[in-house]
Amino acid sequence: MIGKQDLTDDIKIRAKKIKLLLMDCDGVLTDGRLYFTENGEEMKVFHVRDGQGLVIWHEAGFRSGIISGRNSKIVKKRATELGVHFVKQGSKDIAICFEEILAEAKVSMEEVAFVGDDVQDIIVFEKVGLPVAVADAAQEVFPYIIYKTKLAGGFGAVREVINLLLQAKEVI
């Protein structure tokens, strides 16, 4: 659970407006390491608490999405299992993916939270209502965020953000 001291007035105000939670994948939903079998097949490790958090988020009536520069069948499979609404993969232009999702979702920028971990995410951090970085994010991103998770990417950071959002909305 997020401590009351973590929910500043600014974070509460921003979090109450959020309808769409967007996330990077590698380094946010995973620990950022890339795993390959000897046959060159990619493997990813996801934390079950992040998955359960997304299920809870969706059950509360909100939507989510993943934006990833890499293209992975594993990400698509996991997103489908969890009911993630928007998945954009394989584009090096995260800004275009963000704009496409925004148009599809019919939400304003202030109604979006984005969780990222590296410099490619800064362009989205600058636009959204609640920019969040995972605890082990690249140092360069911290001036662009409003909240830094206590947990590292791939180790429950997304669940932490969901708990924060739902607490601010007084859902939990």
Image: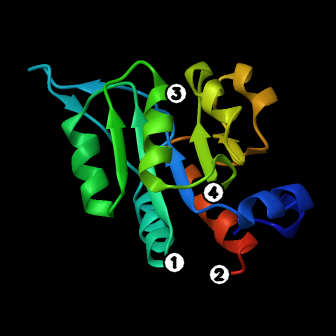
Q: Along the polypeptide, which appears first: circle 4 or circle 3?
A: 3
Give the residue pinned by disc 2: 171
Give the residue pinned by disc 3: 95
Q: CA distance from mark 4 to mark 3?
A: 22 Å
Q: Amino acid at mark 4?
A: Val
Dot 4 crowding, Cα within 10 Å, few <14, some 14–19, many 20+: many
Rendering quarter of residue 126: top right
**Residue 12: x, y in percent?**
81, 64
Q: CA distance from mark 1 to mark 4?
A: 14 Å
Q: Quadrant of the N terminus?
A: bottom right
Give the residue pinned by disc 1: 60
Q: Amino acid at mark 3?
A: Ala
Label 2 vs label 3, nearer the camera? 3
Q: Amino acid at mark 2?
A: Val
Dot 2 crowding, Cα within 10 Å, few <14, some 14–19, many 20+: few
Label 1 vs label 4, nearer the camera? 1
**Residue 138: x, y in percent?**
65, 23
Rendering quarter of residue 2: bottom right
**Residue 100: x, y in percent?**
43, 38
Q: Does the residue at mark 1 contact the one at mark 2 (Cβ under 8 Å)?
A: yes
Q: Residue at x 61, y 20 (%)?
A: 119
Give the residue pinned by disc 4: 161
Label 2 vs label 4, nearer the camera? 2
Q: Does the residue at mark 2 contact the one at mark 4 (Cβ under 8 Å)?
A: no
Residue that protrudes farthest toward the bottom in the picture: 171
Toward the viewer: 26 or 108? 108
